[in-house]
Image: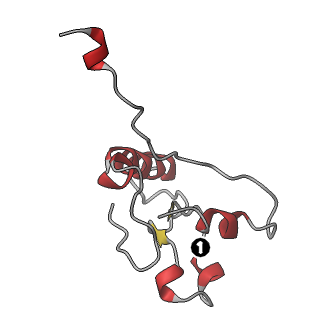
Amino acid sequence: MSYLEKVQKAIPQAPVITIVGFPGVGKSTLAALFPSPIFIQAENASTVFETWPEKDQPAFFPEVQPANAKRKVKPSEIILDQLRELVTSEHIQNGCDRHHHGDEHAV
């Protein structure tokens, strides 16, 4: 087999993006405009989208609760587990080719 027969095009991969900014500047709104977004919540951000049509609302992992003496799992471990699940999920593997307009958000 020649090297020319092995040539292939790049396979698009969905990015994992972090948006940082001051409260109220539109970070969540910007993130929700990306195709098939899934939010990892350090605080409840879902209320930002209460007035949006349900089909346009982004998907959310459950809110990560603050650490306390009774909890056996640290919040940072929960966030890392959520990131690992996203990176290895069909959502990322398929390049997020499902758009959030009417389609399911599968993780």
Name which residue lies at 59% across and 88% down. 50
Query: Looking at the picture, does residue 61 appear above or below residue 48?
Result: above
Query: Looking at the picture, does residue 69 appear above or below residue 4?
Result: below
Q: Residue furthest left?
A: 1
Kind of residue indicated by mark 1: Asn
Count of labels in the image: 1
**Image quadrant for the N terminus?**
top left
Which residue, given by chain and number where applicable, does mark 1 sit on?
A: 44
Q: Is residue 13 left or right of residue 21?
A: left
Viewer-closest of 65 and 89: 89
* Image spot of residue 74 (x, y percent): 46, 50
* Image spot of residue 84 (x, y percent): 38, 44
* Image spot of residue 101 (x, y percent): 47, 77
Name which residue lies at 37% across and 69% down. 105
Q: Residue furthest top?
A: 2
Q: Is residue 21 left or right of residue 82?
A: right
Name which residue lies at 48% across and 56% down. 69
Name which residue lies at 61% across and 81% down. 49
* Image spot of residue 83 (x, y percent): 44, 48
The local crowd at label 1, few if under 14, some if 14 to 19, many if 20 or more residues have their Cα within 10 Å, is few
Viewer-closest of 91 and 50: 91
Q: How is the image coloured?
A: secondary structure
> Secondary structure under badge 1?
loop
Q: Is residue 23 left or right of residue 98?
A: right
**Image quadrant for the C terminus?**
bottom left
Viewer-closest of 100 and 41: 100
